């Protein structure tokens, strides 16, 4: 049992798992922000301009039925809610998706550009760095080689 707990601890505390958990939590919070932007800012503007509130758009497939009461007040037939196809909510979710996708595109693009700049800077630093001076042994060996070539 102790070995199982140690294995789970090693798994749960790996950097990737913790990073992924943080990403999921931040992603959930970001999703709520985007939903608020779409639902509370963008869609009301569209409703004001176009005169249509997209969240209220729906197609009634089966109308609601009111309860039927007997003369004594007892319920003969219970009320039935309307069956609707809420395509306005779908439109809002599609708008949420596109805004999240655009934001993620720009985030990934920025991270990629920063990463490329860092790599380019590292390559330039490596290229600009002077070659290390040869050691005393290398200098002596080079002189010996040159003397041997000169004797031939």
Image: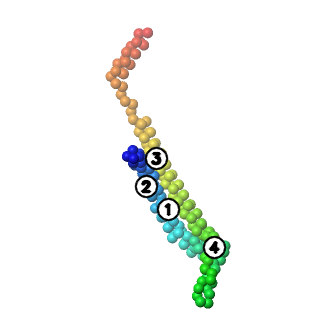
Say which of marks 1 and 2 sits in front: 2
Q: Which residue is mark 2?
A: 22
Q: Which residue is mark 4?
A: 83
Closest to the observer: 4 or 113? 4
Look at the image and tell me in which quarter the C terminus lies.
Answer: top left
Identified at 45% across, 58% down, the residue is: 25
Res 126 → quadrant: top left
Local packing at callout 3 (Cα closer than 10 Å; few below 14, some 14-19, many 20+) is few
Measure how far apart labels 4 and 3 are at the Cα level: 52 Å
N-terminal of the pair, mark 3 or mark 1, is 1
Residue 129 at x, y = what percent? 39, 35
Q: How is the rendered protein coloured?
A: rainbow
Q: Mark 1 and mark 2 in contact? Answer it, CB < 8 Å.
A: no
N-terminal of the pair, mark 1 or mark 4, is 1
Measure how far apart labels 1 and 2 are at the Cα level: 14 Å
Closest to the observer: 70 or 11? 70
Residue 76 at x, y = what percent? 62, 83
**Does residue 12 appear left or right of residue 38 in this picture?**
left
Identified at 66% across, 73% down, the residue is: 61
**Does residue 135 appear left or right of residue 17 in this picture?**
left
| Residue 115: numbered disc | 3
Q: Mark 3 and mark 1 in contact? Answer it, CB < 8 Å.
A: no
Measure how far apart labels 1 and 4 are at the Cα level: 29 Å
């Amino acid at each position: 049992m102790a070995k199982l707990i140690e294995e789970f601890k090693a798994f749960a505390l790996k950097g990737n798992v913790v990073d992924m958990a943080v990403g999921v939590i931040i992603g959930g919070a970001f999703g709520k922000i985007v939903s608020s932007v779409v639902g509370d800012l963008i869609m009301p503007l569209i409703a004001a301009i176009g005169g249509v509130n997209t969240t209220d758009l729906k197609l009634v497939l089966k109308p609601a039925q009111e309860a039927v009461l007997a003369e004594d007040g007892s319920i003969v037939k219970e009320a039935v809610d309307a069956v609707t196809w809420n395509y306005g909510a779908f439109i809002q979710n599609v708008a949420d998706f596109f805004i999240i996708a655009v934001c993620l595109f720009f985030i990934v693009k920025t991270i990629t550009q920063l990463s490329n700049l860092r790599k380019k800077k590292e390559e330039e630093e490596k290229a600009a760095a002077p070659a290390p001076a040869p050691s005393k042994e290398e200098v002596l060996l080079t002189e010996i080689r040159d003397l041997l070539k000169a004797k031939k």
